[in-house]
Each structure stands twice: as C-alpha cells, then as structure tokens.
C-alpha cells in the first residue's frame, strides 16, 4: 500500500456537532516519507481489511506499509532512527483525498431548519411557520435543503409564499444544491435589497 499521508483523529465526544469541531481541533497529518521507518503504536487503526479490521500498530518504510499488527509485534521492526508515534488510542484512517466536501456545513445544518422533507409549496410554508413558532421574535430562520423539483408544478418558492408565516423572523433558506435561496421581506430589508437593487455579477435576484 502506498501512502501520501496518515490521518489521526481523536473522537472523544459523542455529540455530532462537537465531533466536527474536535475533528478539526485534533486532526494530525503526518508525512509518511521517512525512509528509515515510521512506527505508529498504541492506536486504533482501521485497516479496511475484513480479516483484520482493527490493529494497534503499523510500520511504514518509504511510503509503504510493511507491517500491520500489535504494538508488541511492531517493536521488532523499530530501529534507533525510526520515528515512533504513540497514538494514545487515537483513531487512524487512510489519507482521504476528496475534491468537494462541505463537512462543517453538514454539522451546522443539524441546528437549522430542514426543509428537505417538504413535498409541496404548502408543506414548505407550513414547516417554516411551525419552526418560527419555536423561536424568539426576530430570530433568523436559516437552513433549508428544499427541492422544488419534487413539488407539484416544480415552481420556486418566493417571499410571497413565506411572508404570511414568518412576519416576525428574517428567513434565508437555501435549495439543496446551495446555489439558490429564498428570503422573506424582513431578510431582504435587513440586507438592503429592494426593487432597484441590481443583481450581483454572476447571480440573479428574482423579483
């Protein structure tokens, strides 16, 4: 197996949102390039090998894993010039390369209004009304992930639909692709957007 880097993560909390912050706070990336060897010991190493799914230690030489096993067994590989990293039971995963991740957004969305289940414009508005009733007056309503493509008529929502159910709250909720959002009149006023506001470069304000 060829390595470019090793990701070590400490998952010490159970609340998902806290896990997100902990991942960013405790993520450690080590270059796997020591030609004399790198030993990871005392870890929880996910091997992706069904016959040996979890190991305590690995030994790496010149970006290649040459041993996977227990901390006791890996000691036989360790030399004076070896870099030894005590994982202290931290989780080790293979290096991930992903070109398009919104990891923190996924965590924050758990604290916002989820409109993905709405199957129609009326249900969309009703969910906003119910959510607004749970908030103090003036609190923002954000979140969204609505999909008008599954609604009868496939018509975009607009401020006229949601103003009657959200008069005391600014609303800004995005479509599931993140490229379209609807705002109510209070939100538009706070943003200084009116009939005369030009559309931004590369975007469009639907009136």
Image (tube, grey):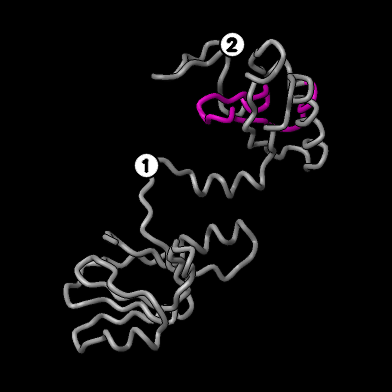
Q: How many badges with numbers are in the image?
A: 2
Residue count near mark 1 (Cα–Cα under 10 Å), binned few <14, some 14–19, many ≥20: few
Quadrant location of the N terminus in the rendered image: bottom left
Residue 162 point in image, percent of width and height = 73, 22
Q: Is residue 75 left or right of residue 198?
A: left
Q: Kindly state the secondary structure of the residue where label 2 is placed.
A: loop
Residue 96 point in image, percent of width and height = 38, 54
Q: Where is 200 relative to 86, above or below? A: above
In magenta stretch: residue 184: yes
Can you tell which of label 2 and label 1 is closer to the viewer?
1
Q: Residue at x 34, y 64 (%)?
A: 6
Q: Kindly state the secondary structure of the residue where label 1 is placed.
A: loop
Residue 34 point in image, percent of width and height = 20, 72
Name the residue tied to disc 1: 99
Who comes first in sequence, dot 2 or dot 1? 1
Per the rendered image, the range of residues in magenta is 164-188
């Amino acid at each position: 197996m060829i390595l470019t880097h090793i990701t070590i993560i400490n998952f010490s909390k159970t609340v998902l949102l806290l896990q997100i912050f902990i991942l960013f706070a405790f993520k450690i990336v080590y270059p796997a390039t020591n030609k004399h060897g790198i030993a990871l010991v005392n870890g929880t190493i996910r091997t992706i090998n069904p016959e040996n799914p979890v190991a305590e230690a690995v030994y790496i030489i010149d970006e290649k894993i040459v041993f996977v096993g227990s901390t006791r067994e890996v000691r036989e590989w360790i030399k004076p010039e070896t870099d030894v990293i005590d994982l202290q039971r931290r989780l080790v995963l293979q290096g991930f390369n992903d070109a398009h991740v919104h990891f923190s957004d996924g965590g924050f969305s758990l604290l916002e209004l989820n409109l993905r289940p709405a199957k129609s414009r009326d249900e969309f508005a009703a969910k906003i009304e119910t959510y607004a009733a749970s908030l103090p007056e003036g609190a923002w309503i954000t979140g969204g992930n609505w999909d008008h493509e599954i609604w009868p008529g496939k018509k975009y929502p607009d401020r006229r639909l949601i103003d009657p159910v959200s008069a005391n709250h600014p609303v800004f909720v995005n479509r599931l692709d993140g490229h379209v959002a609807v705002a109510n009149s209070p939100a538009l006023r706070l943003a200084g957007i009116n009939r005369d506001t030009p559309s931004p470069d590369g975007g469009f304000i639907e009136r």
